[in-house]
Image (spheres, helix red, strand yellow):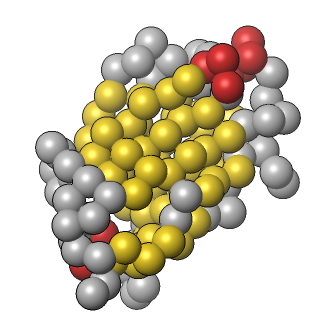
Amino acid sequence: QGQLQESGGGLVQPGGSLRLSCRAPRTITSVFNPSMMGWYRQALGKERELVATISGGGTTEYADSVKGRFTIYRDNSRKTVYLQMNGLAPEDTAVYYCNRKLSGQEFWGQGTVVTVSS
C-alpha cells in the first residue's frame, strides 16, 4: 500500500486536457529509475487496458487509441511519472491506474478518476 500515488484526475470537457501524476515516494531511486512505469485505465463495465508505458531508458509505447493525444514522461529526480492527456474525448472516461514493474514485481496505485463530459 502507498507504493504509488496518483493524482490529477477530474472532470473535463471534450477537447480539454489533464495531466496525471504518479509518485513513488517509498521507492528508492535505484529501484525507481530502471522500473517500467505505465498508465492503464478501466472504464465502467470494461476490462483494464494499457494506455502508455515508459521504460527506465525512456522508451515509450502507446495504445493506438491515444497516440498523438497522450504523452507519458518521467522525472526520475522526483520519482514521478506523468501522463499528459490532450484532446480528451468521452471515451477516455475511466479510472486511470499507475503501474510499476521491475524484476518480476509489480505494483499498482489506487487509481484516479477521469471524466470527460460536457
The quarter holding residue 34 reads top right
In this view, the residue in front, 16 or 116, is 16
Residue at (43%, 63%) from the top-left corner?
41
Q: Position of residue 64 (x, y in %)?
A: 16, 50
Q: Quadrant of residue 61?
A: top left
Q: In this rendering, is residue 6 above or below 57?
A: below
Residue drawn at x 63%, y 54% is: 6
Q: Where does residue 54 sit, x and y in percent of width and height? A: 42, 29
- Tell me how many marks there are: 0
In-image side of 45 versus 69 (left or right): right
Q: Residue at x 68, y 40 (%)?
A: 23
Q: Residue at x 43, y 30 (%)?
A: 73
In the picture, measured across the screen, residue 28 lies left or right of residue 12, that is right
The answer to whether residue 104 shows anywhere in this view is no
Image spot of residue 52 (x, y percent): 36, 43
Q: In the image, is 20 to the left or to the right of 90?
A: right
Residue 89 vs residue 26: left or right? left
For residue 30, which quarter of the picture? top right
User: Which one is nearer the viewer's eye here, 101 or 91?
Assistant: 91
Task: Estimate the x, y position of residue 115 in percent, counting from the top left.
Answer: 41, 78
Residue 39 visible in image: yes
Report the quarter where the C terminus lies: bottom left
Observer-nearest of 49 and 33: 33
**Which quadrant of the rendered structure holds the N terminus?**
bottom right
